[in-house]
Amino acid sequence: MQKEYKDEVVAHTVAQVKAGRTPNPDILCNQRIKFGLFLDNIDPSFEKVASGHYAQAREKDGKIELFQSPDAIKDQTYFLSHLSQNQLKRVMFPIGHLQKSELRALAHDFNLPNKDRKDSQGICFLGKFKFSDFIKHHLGTKQGLMIESETGKIMGNHDGFWFYTIGQRQGLGLGGGPWYVVAKDCDKNIIYISRNYYDSEKRRDTFYVEEINWLSGMPGEKNEFLVKLRHGPQKYDCSIKYAENHEVLVTISGQDQGIAAGQYAVFYDGDVCVGSGIIMHEKN
């Protein structure tokens, strides 16, 4: 399914980066390929597909709920949050109830050949390649300006806005910092940077999401959840409010310095993953 993968995941990722957004190819891969086109193309006599994701699926009132793994660091419900009910009904997670340490111990007990293999990291289709190298291959380089957001002063040059994401600190190559990327002008290929990224006046606790996928249907009147803005154990308390054009305004309980358009906000009710949406922009 290499062509399908290129068309459905790689091309979308490149287009999103070119538009100045920060996509998540792994979520797209799970939705469109691993549990999408793959399930569509195998013999329908196969009732279930077993996956090594750290997640749990349980049936409740005729619907499948997606539960977190007990290993908060390895939990992968974030990457599965855009699946449909039909997809969840055909997948099983035989290791989802285990801690990674328990799985390692079992692998040694059974003397499996991969018992000491390093954990996989990064985006699934890149392997050992860096994301920046992947982007360079598809979008090339184009010199642009780094401008201090508060003063408008030119601080340096860069090789293309597509190599940067909001909140990024590493790789700017400037002294007198730390410097952070605070905005991008994609039309003019300008990166706006600041040393005052954590200024208390710069509130980063509200944003809009679109294309919300509720795993078991809309949650009725409930509007208080937990939310992850990236893969990992950190969650915020949050409230949601439905706005125009099917957008949802999300307000989180803390200040997150890495809210970027294109990322996924994944919502939880306790340890149940209830769905996710794509971040559009911060509230002005």
Image (spheres, grey):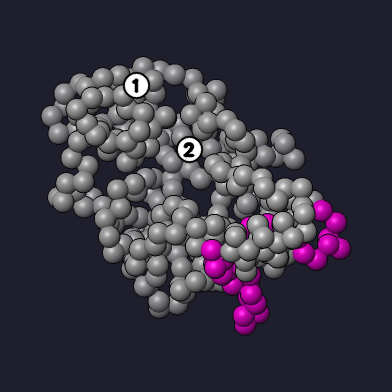
| Sequence-earlier tag: 2 or 1 | 2
Residue 121 visible at all = yes
Looking at the rendered structure, the secondary structure element under dot 2 is helix
Instruction: Find residue 238 and report its horizontal and vertical position in percent.
Output: 34, 66
From the image, tell me which residue sits under label 1.
158
Residue pictured at 46% horizontal, 55% vertical: 232
- Which residues, given as a range, are shown in magenta? 42-71
Disc 2 marks a residue whose amino acid type is Gln
From the image, tell me which residue sits under label 2.
16
Mark 2 to mark 1 CA distance (whole Å)? 19 Å
Residue pictured at 70% horizontal, 61% vertical: 106
Depth order, front residue of 70/115: 115
Depth order, front residue of 114/52: 114
Residue 45 in the magenta stretch? The answer is: yes
Q: Is residue 150 left or right of residue 260?
A: left
Disc 2: CA contacts within 10 A as few (<14), some (14-19) or many (>=20)? some
Residue 109 found in image quarter: bottom right
18 to 85, vertically: above or below: above
Residue 247 found in image quarter: bottom left
Instruction: Find residue 230 and report its horizontal and vertical position in percent.
Output: 44, 52
Q: Which mark is residue 215?
A: none
Disc 1 marks a residue whose amino acid type is His
Q: Is residue 59 left or right of residue 260?
A: right
Q: Quadrant of the N terminus?
A: top right
Looking at the rendered structure, the secondary structure element under dot 1 is strand
Residue 213 visible at all = no
Residue pictured at 51% horizontal, 33% vertical: 131
Residue pictured at 38% horizontal, 32% vertical: 164
Disc 1: CA contacts within 10 A as few (<14), some (14-19) or many (>=20)? some
